[in-house]
Image (tube, rainbow, N blue to C red):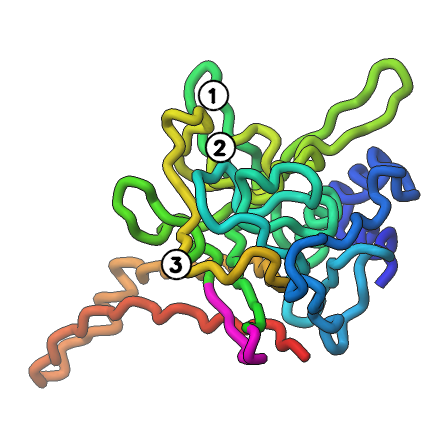
Amino acid sequence: MNFLLALARCGLATILILLLFGTTLRADDTPAEKPAEDPFAKQRFNPPVGLNRFVKGRDIWLDGKRKRVVIDGVICLREGQLEMFACLRHTKEHESVIAVNCTAKQAHAGLLYVGAISGHPASFEPEYSPATGTIIDIVILWIDKEGKKHNTKAQNWVRNIKTRKAMKYDWVFAGSGVWVDPENGDVFYHADSGDFICVSNFPSATLDLPVESPQANSRLRYDAYTKNIPAKGTPIRMVLTPRRPQPTKTKPATGDADNAKKDDGKEQPAEKKSEATPPIEKKTVGTS
Protein backbone atom coordinates (compact mmCIF):
# COMPACT_ATOMS: atom_id res chain seq x y z
CA MET A 1 0.00 0.00 0.00
CA ASN A 2 1.29 3.40 -0.91
CA PHE A 3 2.23 5.45 2.15
CA LEU A 4 0.90 8.73 0.78
CA LEU A 5 -2.34 7.23 -0.54
CA ALA A 6 -3.01 5.71 2.86
CA LEU A 7 -2.46 9.04 4.54
CA ALA A 8 -4.79 10.80 2.13
CA ARG A 9 -7.57 8.35 2.98
CA CYS A 10 -7.51 9.37 6.64
CA GLY A 11 -9.27 12.71 6.18
CA LEU A 12 -8.43 16.36 6.62
CA ALA A 13 -6.33 15.94 9.78
CA THR A 14 -4.08 13.45 8.06
CA ILE A 15 -3.78 15.55 4.92
CA LEU A 16 -2.45 18.32 7.15
CA ILE A 17 0.06 15.85 8.59
CA LEU A 18 1.07 14.94 5.04
CA LEU A 19 1.64 18.59 4.20
CA LEU A 20 3.71 19.05 7.35
CA PHE A 21 5.81 15.95 6.86
CA GLY A 22 6.42 16.40 3.15
CA THR A 23 5.87 13.93 0.34
CA THR A 24 9.21 12.15 0.54
CA LEU A 25 11.01 10.32 3.30
CA ARG A 26 13.86 12.21 4.92
CA ALA A 27 17.41 10.99 5.21
CA ASP A 28 16.67 9.95 8.81
CA ASP A 29 13.94 7.62 7.46
CA THR A 30 16.44 5.37 5.69
CA PRO A 31 16.26 1.71 6.79
CA ALA A 32 18.08 1.01 10.03
CA GLU A 33 20.98 -1.42 10.04
CA LYS A 34 20.24 -4.98 11.06
CA PRO A 35 20.96 -5.65 14.75
CA ALA A 36 24.28 -7.36 15.45
CA GLU A 37 23.28 -9.40 18.51
CA ASP A 38 23.43 -13.21 18.79
CA PRO A 39 22.83 -15.48 15.78
CA PHE A 40 19.17 -16.01 16.78
CA ALA A 41 18.53 -12.34 15.97
CA LYS A 42 19.24 -13.08 12.32
CA GLN A 43 15.97 -14.98 12.12
CA ARG A 44 13.20 -12.75 10.82
CA PHE A 45 9.46 -13.00 10.46
CA ASN A 46 8.22 -13.40 6.93
CA PRO A 47 6.07 -10.46 5.75
CA PRO A 48 2.44 -10.87 6.91
CA VAL A 49 0.44 -12.82 4.36
CA GLY A 50 -1.96 -10.65 2.38
CA LEU A 51 -0.68 -7.32 3.74
CA ASN A 52 1.29 -4.70 1.85
CA ARG A 53 4.29 -2.95 3.37
CA PHE A 54 3.27 0.58 4.41
CA VAL A 55 6.65 2.23 3.79
CA LYS A 56 9.40 0.86 1.57
CA GLY A 57 12.37 -0.33 3.60
CA ARG A 58 10.44 -0.30 6.88
CA ASP A 59 8.89 -3.18 8.80
CA ILE A 60 5.37 -1.80 9.09
CA TRP A 61 2.21 -3.12 7.43
CA LEU A 62 -1.46 -2.11 7.53
CA ASP A 63 -4.38 -4.48 7.86
CA GLY A 64 -7.29 -2.40 6.61
CA LYS A 65 -9.75 -5.29 6.84
CA ARG A 66 -9.11 -6.08 10.50
CA LYS A 67 -8.20 -2.46 11.33
CA ARG A 68 -4.76 -2.97 12.82
CA VAL A 69 -1.12 -1.99 12.34
CA VAL A 70 1.64 -4.61 12.25
CA ILE A 71 5.21 -3.63 13.16
CA ASP A 72 8.30 -5.83 13.43
CA GLY A 73 11.17 -5.24 15.82
CA VAL A 74 13.60 -6.93 18.16
CA ILE A 75 13.91 -7.37 21.93
CA CYS A 76 16.63 -4.98 23.08
CA LEU A 77 16.32 -5.15 26.91
CA ARG A 78 15.17 -7.74 29.45
CA GLU A 79 16.28 -6.23 32.76
CA GLY A 80 16.14 -2.73 34.21
CA GLN A 81 13.82 0.21 34.73
CA LEU A 82 11.75 1.44 31.82
CA GLU A 83 10.62 4.75 30.41
CA MET A 84 9.47 3.20 27.13
CA PHE A 85 7.98 -0.11 26.11
CA ALA A 86 9.00 0.37 22.48
CA CYS A 87 11.36 2.87 20.88
CA LEU A 88 12.83 3.36 17.41
CA ARG A 89 16.04 1.53 16.55
CA HIS A 90 19.19 3.39 17.55
CA THR A 91 17.37 5.73 19.96
CA LYS A 92 16.42 4.62 23.50
CA GLU A 93 17.18 0.91 23.63
CA HIS A 94 18.70 1.31 27.11
CA GLU A 95 15.23 1.96 28.59
CA SER A 96 12.90 0.09 26.21
CA VAL A 97 11.97 -3.57 25.88
CA ILE A 98 11.53 -3.42 22.09
CA ALA A 99 13.17 -1.48 19.27
CA VAL A 100 11.20 -1.27 16.01
CA ASN A 101 12.23 -0.73 12.41
CA CYS A 102 9.91 2.14 11.50
CA THR A 103 9.47 5.71 12.66
CA ALA A 104 6.89 6.87 15.18
CA LYS A 105 5.55 9.22 12.51
CA GLN A 106 4.81 6.27 10.23
CA ALA A 107 3.11 4.34 13.05
CA HIS A 108 1.01 7.45 13.80
CA ALA A 109 -0.14 7.64 10.19
CA GLY A 110 -0.90 3.92 10.17
CA LEU A 111 -3.06 4.16 13.28
CA LEU A 112 -5.02 7.02 11.72
CA TYR A 113 -5.57 4.92 8.63
CA VAL A 114 -7.10 2.02 10.59
CA GLY A 115 -9.46 4.32 12.46
CA ALA A 116 -7.70 5.39 15.66
CA ILE A 117 -8.29 8.94 16.87
CA SER A 118 -5.38 10.80 18.43
CA GLY A 119 -6.00 12.79 21.59
CA HIS A 120 -3.23 14.74 23.29
CA PRO A 121 -0.06 13.83 25.23
CA ALA A 122 0.24 14.30 28.97
CA SER A 123 0.84 17.86 30.17
CA PHE A 124 2.15 19.09 33.49
CA GLU A 125 1.37 22.81 33.66
CA PRO A 126 -0.52 24.41 35.31
CA GLU A 127 -1.44 20.97 36.67
CA TYR A 128 -1.13 17.37 35.54
CA SER A 129 -3.43 16.32 32.70
CA PRO A 130 -3.24 12.69 31.49
CA ALA A 131 -2.77 11.57 27.91
CA THR A 132 -5.94 10.91 25.92
CA GLY A 133 -6.88 9.18 22.68
CA THR A 134 -8.19 5.87 21.36
CA ILE A 135 -7.14 2.87 23.46
CA ILE A 136 -4.65 0.75 21.50
CA ASP A 137 -4.48 -2.96 22.31
CA ILE A 138 -0.97 -4.33 21.73
CA VAL A 139 -0.18 -8.01 21.21
CA ILE A 140 3.37 -9.34 20.80
CA LEU A 141 4.17 -12.41 18.68
CA TRP A 142 7.45 -14.34 18.61
CA ILE A 143 8.91 -17.75 17.77
CA ASP A 144 11.16 -19.63 20.19
CA LYS A 145 14.28 -21.56 19.26
CA GLU A 146 12.28 -24.76 18.88
CA GLY A 147 10.06 -23.07 16.31
CA LYS A 148 7.01 -22.77 18.58
CA LYS A 149 4.84 -19.68 18.09
CA HIS A 150 3.85 -17.52 21.07
CA ASN A 151 1.79 -14.39 21.70
CA THR A 152 1.04 -12.23 24.72
CA LYS A 153 -0.33 -8.85 25.71
CA ALA A 154 2.40 -6.20 25.82
CA GLN A 155 1.48 -5.42 29.44
CA ASN A 156 2.85 -8.82 30.47
CA TRP A 157 6.38 -7.64 29.65
CA VAL A 158 6.12 -4.58 31.90
CA ARG A 159 6.20 -4.97 35.70
CA ASN A 160 4.97 -2.56 38.34
CA ILE A 161 8.00 -2.06 40.60
CA LYS A 162 5.85 -1.68 43.72
CA THR A 163 3.33 -4.50 43.26
CA ARG A 164 5.72 -6.83 41.37
CA LYS A 165 2.87 -7.64 38.99
CA ALA A 166 2.27 -6.99 35.30
CA MET A 167 1.19 -3.48 34.36
CA LYS A 168 -2.60 -3.20 34.33
CA TYR A 169 -3.11 -0.03 32.27
CA ASP A 170 -3.86 0.27 28.55
CA TRP A 171 -2.05 2.60 26.18
CA VAL A 172 -3.81 5.49 24.47
CA PHE A 173 -3.05 7.18 21.14
CA ALA A 174 -1.73 10.49 22.47
CA GLY A 175 -0.39 11.56 19.07
CA SER A 176 2.86 13.35 20.03
CA GLY A 177 3.31 16.68 18.19
CA VAL A 178 5.48 18.52 15.69
CA TRP A 179 8.15 21.20 15.77
CA VAL A 180 8.92 23.54 12.88
CA ASP A 181 12.49 24.73 12.40
CA PRO A 182 12.22 28.54 12.09
CA GLU A 183 15.40 28.63 10.02
CA ASN A 184 14.34 26.41 7.15
CA GLY A 185 10.73 25.40 7.81
CA ASP A 186 11.56 21.69 8.26
CA VAL A 187 8.97 19.86 10.34
CA PHE A 188 9.97 17.25 12.92
CA TYR A 189 7.66 14.77 14.65
CA HIS A 190 8.57 14.80 18.35
CA ALA A 191 8.33 11.04 18.98
CA ASP A 192 10.83 10.29 16.21
CA SER A 193 13.46 11.01 18.85
CA GLY A 194 12.47 7.64 20.33
CA ASP A 195 9.36 8.24 22.48
CA PHE A 196 7.12 5.81 20.61
CA ILE A 197 5.25 3.67 23.20
CA CYS A 198 5.89 5.06 26.68
CA VAL A 199 5.37 3.81 30.23
CA SER A 200 6.49 7.13 31.70
CA ASN A 201 4.60 10.25 30.69
CA PHE A 202 6.27 12.26 27.92
CA PRO A 203 4.71 15.23 26.11
CA SER A 204 6.32 13.81 22.96
CA ALA A 205 4.78 10.31 23.20
CA THR A 206 2.88 8.69 20.34
CA LEU A 207 1.33 6.16 22.74
CA ASP A 208 1.27 6.77 26.49
CA LEU A 209 -0.49 5.64 29.66
CA PRO A 210 -3.65 7.55 30.65
CA VAL A 211 -2.44 7.84 34.25
CA GLU A 212 0.33 9.74 35.98
CA SER A 213 3.66 7.94 35.60
CA PRO A 214 6.71 10.11 36.43
CA GLN A 215 9.81 10.05 34.24
CA ALA A 216 12.29 11.04 36.96
CA ASN A 217 14.72 8.15 37.59
CA SER A 218 13.98 8.13 41.31
CA ARG A 219 10.24 7.83 40.67
CA LEU A 220 10.04 5.39 37.76
CA ARG A 221 7.17 2.97 38.29
CA TYR A 222 7.94 0.18 35.86
CA ASP A 223 10.72 -2.21 34.94
CA ALA A 224 11.12 -5.10 32.51
CA TYR A 225 9.23 -8.23 33.59
CA THR A 226 12.30 -10.34 32.92
CA LYS A 227 10.85 -13.82 33.43
CA ASN A 228 8.20 -13.18 30.77
CA ILE A 229 10.52 -11.75 28.10
CA PRO A 230 12.35 -13.96 25.56
CA ALA A 231 16.08 -13.67 24.95
CA LYS A 232 17.61 -10.37 23.93
CA GLY A 233 17.81 -10.18 20.16
CA THR A 234 14.65 -12.22 19.58
CA PRO A 235 12.66 -10.89 16.60
CA ILE A 236 9.09 -9.92 17.49
CA ARG A 237 5.95 -8.85 15.69
CA MET A 238 3.80 -6.21 17.35
CA VAL A 239 0.10 -5.92 16.44
CA LEU A 240 -1.60 -2.62 17.34
CA THR A 241 -5.40 -2.64 17.25
CA PRO A 242 -7.53 0.44 18.06
CA ARG A 243 -10.20 -0.60 20.51
CA ARG A 244 -13.71 0.08 19.35
CA PRO A 245 -15.77 2.06 21.85
CA GLN A 246 -18.51 0.07 23.54
CA PRO A 247 -22.04 1.22 22.64
CA THR A 248 -23.73 3.21 25.37
CA LYS A 249 -26.79 1.52 26.80
CA THR A 250 -29.71 3.88 27.28
CA LYS A 251 -32.60 3.28 29.66
CA PRO A 252 -36.13 3.63 28.25
CA ALA A 253 -38.12 6.65 29.31
CA THR A 254 -40.22 6.14 32.44
CA GLY A 255 -43.48 6.27 30.52
CA ASP A 256 -42.30 3.67 27.99
CA ALA A 257 -41.07 1.41 30.75
CA ASP A 258 -44.43 1.61 32.52
CA ASN A 259 -46.31 0.82 29.32
CA ALA A 260 -44.01 -2.11 28.62
CA LYS A 261 -44.89 -3.69 31.97
CA LYS A 262 -48.66 -3.54 31.95
CA ASP A 263 -50.36 -5.53 34.66
CA ASP A 264 -51.91 -8.58 32.95
CA GLY A 265 -52.90 -10.25 36.20
CA LYS A 266 -49.85 -12.45 36.24
CA GLU A 267 -46.90 -12.23 38.59
CA GLN A 268 -44.05 -10.40 36.90
CA PRO A 269 -40.71 -12.27 36.98
CA ALA A 270 -37.84 -10.65 38.87
CA GLU A 271 -35.52 -8.65 36.65
CA LYS A 272 -32.18 -10.27 36.02
CA LYS A 273 -29.06 -8.34 36.81
CA SER A 274 -27.11 -7.55 33.68
CA GLU A 275 -23.87 -9.45 33.32
CA ALA A 276 -20.58 -7.82 32.40
CA THR A 277 -19.88 -7.77 28.68
CA PRO A 278 -17.32 -10.49 27.89
CA PRO A 279 -13.98 -9.24 26.63
CA ILE A 280 -13.60 -9.01 22.87
CA GLU A 281 -11.39 -11.75 21.50
CA LYS A 282 -8.18 -10.32 20.16
CA LYS A 283 -7.09 -11.74 16.84
CA THR A 284 -3.40 -11.75 16.07
CA VAL A 285 -1.48 -11.83 12.83
CA GLY A 286 -0.17 -15.26 11.98
CA THR A 287 3.44 -15.91 11.25
CA SER A 288 5.08 -18.09 8.70
Q: Is residue 148 located in the magenta-colored stretch of the structure?
A: yes
Task: State which quadrant residue 267 falls in.
Answer: bottom left
Residue picked out by circle 2: 201
Three-letter amino acid code of the residue under disc 2: Asn
Q: Secondary structure at mark 1?
A: loop
Q: Quadrant of the C terminus?
A: bottom right
> In this view of the protein, can residue 41 be seen by the observer?
yes
Rendered-image quadrant of the N terminus: bottom right
**What residue would you read off at disc 1?**
124
Residue 193 image position (x, y, % from top left)? 69, 33
CA gap, disc 1 and disc 3:
34 Å
Q: Position of residue 257 (x, y in %)?
A: 25, 66
Residue at mark 3: 227
Marks 1 and 3, the one that precedes in the sequence: 1
Circle 2 sits in a helix, a strand or a loop, which is it?
loop
Question: Magenta residues, as a range?
Answer: 145-152
Q: Amino acid at mark 3?
A: Lys
- The amino acid type, in three-letter code, at marker 1 is Phe
Examine the rendered structure and indicate whether residue 97 appears above or below residue 84.
below
Residue 24 appears left or right of 18? right
Q: Nearer the viewer, residue 254 or 15?
A: 15
Quadrant position of residue 144: bottom right
- Of marks 1 and 3, the one in the foreground: 3
Q: Residues within 10 Å of mark 3 (few under 14, many from 20)?
A: few
Q: Who's the residue at 42% across and 18% down the image?
A: 127
Q: Secondary structure at mark 3?
A: helix
**Pointer 2 or 1: first along the chain:** 1
Mark toward the viewer: 2 or 1 = 2
Q: Residue at x 54, y 63 (%)?
A: 140
Mark 2, other Cα within 10 Å: few <14 / some 14–19 / many ≥20: many
